[in-house]
């Protein structure tokens, strides 16, 4: 951590004027009037329209592609295929990435890009796609996770060998990697248990479901410069990956972000962007590509499906003695699910000593998965929290008391080797237990479930810049993305530091050429990390202004103090000087030492882990299997809510995404290997009439490593939701579902199995 | 290529003329020909409501309307909602109560909510939820959207009674 923060970090006694209030966000007015520009909203003179040809087979060898007829069509300005991208070896990370963007040797899923056209109109581009002739050698495909691991399964990548398994070097497989992570002695732990529960669970891939399809405009010049406008969770990460797969210097690539219409992890990777660039390089004109919803479902995003076997044991007085898990994740056609998160996070929040986990990642003929809030964690916590509640029931303990008895606290060393500093899991559980929801009786005919969840939260490379303008107002440059309001939260922290009204501060995005590197906006890292960097920037600017106040008064710097937005003599002994405002000092830049700004770049550490507990009341229609969520409460530790309404919004949005995942959302495939529901009618996300108000309880156990105590709140809100709904359904019907989504046909089957 | 159709229409009170292909959707023309990009296209199948506009007062998904159908009709989009420099109570309350996060669904939700309140100035929570069931939002979980509509309705009723 940067020295300036170590010296003057979090203080519980600090009186706050702006942090903790709910001002209107500065990007708000543009969003309620239609002015805000999202990915698809940029219109550039001379712009062409790009369209992508996609594979009609889930698995096939690409024998030949003939684009000559498409190229000859009037209005077509460029046609590209895999051959137009730099060659990168198969089986490497970059090789996978470029092949997912545009197929080379084989197509691996229905919807896999094969070629693309840029034309003077969308209509012409679409027609030209039909003129591209592709010869395939169709191969057997495999969609199901379990089937993909069988010895006779169709093999996607003939070069693939399971990483992490001895003796696997000469065996073709669809298992990418095995990951073992254990602590203590589970044999001993289970031997000490009075109750042991072991269950199998499964989940299907679902989609992040952002309402804004990916949209971009690329413009390339003859000397190799690339200008890219796009919706993204990480401009610098896009730039640096483009540099690798297009073999271009990063300095020649400028990525500018639009407003982002939802990402949730799904916009941490690019899809059409490199295609638009290569089309523009050929056509020498700007090229716009906007994906359709059908393309978004078939070829971007989905979230890893999973299978798990989980076993836990506890003593009759409520102490968990051991936990064991075997996990398998569906990563789509290429590796990259982030599945190692699961073993690390699934039990973390309970102070367990004996844990054994074995995880694997498996390829199949589906689109490559992408991140989604707490990647790979909610779908296995669904199982863990089912078993926890089942154990509590067997022991005869209240489910929250059982969780409290096993709750991790400061000093606990996790399975992944980190020792917790001050965390708020106990406080979260206590707040849940005392909540109005939990203390109210379960209404007649309904079931109640609780479930907890954890996410590490993240820090990482972060750069920001703050400028004091000559009139004393302040501009902030950010290189991260704003998923739901980080600009206002960061502006609030800056205003608090500088002691000026929030209205005097404005934060904007810089493109990749205008600011230093920033890691992707993901993992609940942005408001935390950028907050630190901008507070540091503000403090550097204050230090400079102290120097200038001292010079104006002709006194040593140590004799100037800064408080409440004014520079004052440290005592009356220093001299009789009127306080100077930031504006007073800023107005003299041209007659003193020039402009005043602060900037900061850090690999931010000190993120405070996040914990939550959800309470769900549901009614289950036993004739149709439909689940009605009647009441729902999210309790979560935010460390410090900078903007409480936005924190509540994160809690509520995460919970409803989790409810959708729990009850409806799944990728449905036919025998033919085609996705059967690539639209919002058949892929049913929750609508307003599906859910109740989502009550929230913000717990604030300060993160000691942040100047305002905050912990990220982006991921945790979805983690417990599947388990809470599952446990509530179990309470309502008498048997706890183990398969996601808990859709009507599956619930009817379960209900029938009881009768 | 099929012959283009000449269309005369009113958008937010202003007269517009454009040429469109027979199969071109209204959202496509609004965004790409008239450059009114406040109306968003989220699905093109009438399921997400991001492209909601009113056509002669009727709430429609502009992805399900052909541009040529707008001939002689009056269209209202998000760009025409504010009254000069003044945001409407609906727009303002959405800002104050944080009824939006990323903002991509917001234009469609505001257009739909306005249409609701014109028909029913005093809706119940359930009525708001069912009216907005055609407008997907993935960020908010709907809670603050519903609260914003109810609060705006209350404020607007107050104005009428005053």
Image: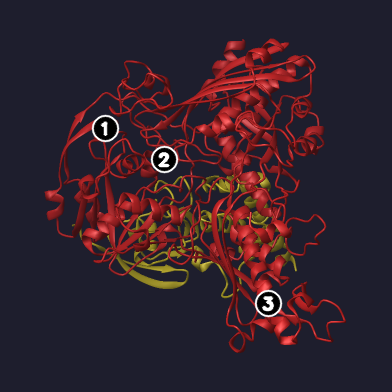
Image location (x, y in percent) of residue B21: 27, 59
Quarter of the image holding residue A137? top left
The residue that appears at 60% across and 27% down in the rendered structure is: A382
- Where does the image place residue A135, in percent across and percent down from the top left? 16, 36
Figure colour of chain B: yellow
Q: Is mark 3 on a helix, strand or loop?
A: helix
* Residue at the spot 76% in from the left edge and 78% down from the top edge: A567
Going by the picture, which residue comes out furthest to the right?
Answer: A572
Residue A397's disc is: none
Tell which of A621 and A692 is nearer to you. A692
Residue that label 1 marks:
A57
- Chain A hue? red
Q: How many angstroms separate mark 2 from mark 3 (CA)?
A: 56 Å
Query: Which residue is nearer to you in this view: B153 or A133?
Result: A133
Relative to residue A276, is residue A431 depicted above or below? above
Residue B34 in view, yes or no:
yes
Q: CA–CA distance between discs 1 and 3? A: 65 Å
Residue A185 x %, y %: 64, 17
Label whose residue precedes the other's in the sequence (2 or 1): 1
In the rendered image, which residue does mark 2 sit on? A679
User: Pointers 2 and 1 in contact (CB under 8 A)?
Assistant: no
Q: Which of A600 and A433 is in front in this view?
A: A600
Question: Which chain letter goes with mark 1?
Answer: A
Q: How far apart are marks 2 and 1 (CA)?
A: 19 Å
Q: Residues within 10 Å of mark 1 (few under 14, many from 20)?
A: many
Which residue bears the numbered disc 3? A545
> Could you tell me which quadrant the N terminus of chain A lies in?
bottom right
Q: Which residue lies furthest to the front in this view?
A: A556
Secondary element type, mark 2: loop
């Amino acid at each position: 951590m940067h020295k300036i923060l170590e010296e003057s970090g979090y203080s519980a006694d600090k009186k706050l004027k702006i942090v903790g209030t709910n001002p209107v966000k500065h990007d708000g007015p543009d969003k309620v009037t239609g002015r805000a520009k999202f990915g698809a909203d940029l219109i550039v003179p001379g712009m062409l329209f790009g369209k992508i040809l996609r594979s009609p087979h889930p698995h096939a060898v690409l024998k030949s592609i003939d684009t000559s007829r498409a190229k000859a069509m009037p209005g077509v300005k460029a046609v590209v295929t895999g051959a137009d991208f730099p060659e990168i070896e198969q089986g490497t990370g970059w090789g996978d990435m470029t092949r997912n963007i545009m197929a080379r040797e084989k197509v691996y899923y229905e919807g896999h890009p094969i070629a693309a056209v840029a034309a003077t109109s969308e209509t012409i581009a679409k027609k030209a796609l039909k003129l591209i002739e592709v010869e395939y050698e169709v191969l057997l495909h495999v969609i199901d996770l379990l089937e993909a691991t069988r010895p006779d399964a169709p093999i996607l990548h003939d070069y693939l060998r399971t990483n992490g398994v001895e003796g696997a070097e000469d065996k073709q497989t669809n298992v990418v990697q095995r990951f073992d992570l254990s602590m203590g002695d589970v044999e001993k732990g289970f031997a000490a248990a009075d109750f042991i529960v072991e269950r199998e669970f499964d989940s299907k891939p679902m989609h992040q479901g952002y309402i804004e399809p990916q949209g971009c405009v690329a413009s390339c010049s003859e000397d190799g410069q690339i200008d890219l406008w796009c919706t993204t969770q990480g401009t610098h990460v896009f730039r640096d990956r483009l540099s690798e797969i297009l073999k271009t210097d990063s300095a020649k690539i400028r990525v500018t972000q639009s407003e982002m219409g939802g990402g949730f992890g799904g916009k941490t990777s690019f899809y059409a962007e490199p295609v638009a660039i290569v089309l523009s390089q050929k056509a020498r004109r700007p090229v716009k590509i906007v994906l359709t919803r059908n393309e978004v479902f078939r070829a971007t995003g989905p979230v890893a499906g999973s299978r798990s076997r989980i076993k836990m044991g506890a003593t009759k007085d409520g102490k968990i003695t051991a936990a064991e898990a075997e996990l398998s994740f569906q990563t789509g056609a290429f590796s990259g699910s982030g599945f190692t998160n699961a073993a690390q996070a699934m039990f973390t929040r309970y102070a367990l000593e004996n844990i054994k986990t074995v995880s694997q990642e498996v390829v199949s003929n589906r689109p490559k998965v992408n991140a989604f809030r707490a990647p790979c964690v909610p779908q296995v916590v669904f199982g863990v929290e089912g078993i926890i509640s089942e154990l509590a029931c067997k022991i005869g303990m209240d489910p929250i008391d059982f969780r409290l008895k096993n709750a991790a606290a400061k000093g606990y060393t996790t399975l992944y080797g980190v020792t917790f500093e001050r965390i708020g899991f106990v406080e979260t559980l206590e707040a849940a237990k005392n909540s109005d929801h939990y203390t109210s009786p379960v209404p007649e005919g309904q079931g109640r479930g609780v479930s907890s969840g954890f996410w590490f939260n993240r820090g990482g490379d972060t750069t920001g810049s703050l400028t004091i303008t000559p009139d004393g107002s302040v501009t902030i440059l950010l290189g991260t993305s704003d998923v739901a309001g980080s600009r206002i939260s960061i502006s609030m922290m800056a205003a608090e530091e500088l002691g000026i009204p929030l209205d005097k501060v404005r934060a904007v995005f810089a493109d990749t050429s205008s600011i230093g590197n920033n890691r992707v906006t993901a993992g609940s890292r942005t408001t935390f990390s950028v907050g630190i960097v901008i507070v540091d920037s503000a403090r550097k600017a204050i230090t400079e202004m102290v120097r200038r106040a001292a010079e104006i008064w002709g006194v040593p710097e140590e004799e100037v103090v800064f408080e409440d937005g004014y520079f004052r003599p440290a005592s009356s002994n220093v001299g009789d000087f009127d306080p100077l405002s930031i504006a007073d000092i800023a107005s003299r830049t041209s007659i003193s030492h020039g402009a005043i700004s602060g900037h900061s770049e850090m690999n931010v550490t000190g993120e405070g882990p996040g914990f939550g507990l959800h309470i769900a009341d549901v009614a289950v229609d036993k004739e149709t299997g439909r689940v009605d969520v009647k009441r729902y409460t999210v309790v979560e530790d935010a460390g410090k809510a900078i903007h409480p309404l936005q924190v509540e919004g994160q809690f509520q949005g995460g919970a409803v995404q989790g409810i959708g995942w729990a009850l409806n959302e799944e990728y449905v495939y036919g025998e033919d290997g085609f996705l059967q529901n690539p639209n919002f009618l058949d892929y049913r996300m929750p609508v307003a009439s599906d859910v109740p108000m989502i009550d929230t309880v913000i717990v604030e156990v300060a993160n000691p490593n942040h100047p305002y105590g905050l912990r990220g709140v982006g991921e945790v809100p979805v983690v417990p939701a599947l388990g809470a709904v599952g446990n509530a359904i179990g309470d309502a019907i008498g048997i706890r579902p183990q398969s996601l989504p808990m859709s009507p046909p599956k619930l009817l089957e379960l209900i029938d199995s009881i009768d | 290529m099929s012959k283009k159709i000449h269309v005369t229409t009113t958008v937010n009170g202003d007269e517009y003329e454009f040429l469109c292909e027979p199969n071109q959707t209204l959202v496509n023309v609004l965004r790409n020909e008239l450059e009114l990009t406040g109306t968003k296209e989220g699905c093109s199948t009438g399921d997400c409501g991001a492209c909601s506009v009113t056509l002669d007062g009727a709430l429609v998904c502009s992805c399900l309307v052909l541009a040529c159908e707008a001939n002689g009709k009056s269209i209202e989009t998000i760009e025409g909602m504010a009254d000069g420099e003044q945001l409407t109570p609906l727009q303002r309350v959405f800002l104050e109560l944080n009824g939006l996060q990323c903002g991509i669904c917001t234009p469609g939700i505001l257009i739909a909510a306005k249409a609701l309140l014109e028909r029913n100035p005093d809706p119940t929570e359930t009525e708001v939820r069912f009216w907005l069931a055609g407008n997907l939002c993935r960020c908010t979980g709907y809670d603050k959207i519903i609260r914003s509509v109810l609060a705006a309705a209350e404020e607007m009723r107050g104005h009428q009674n005053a």
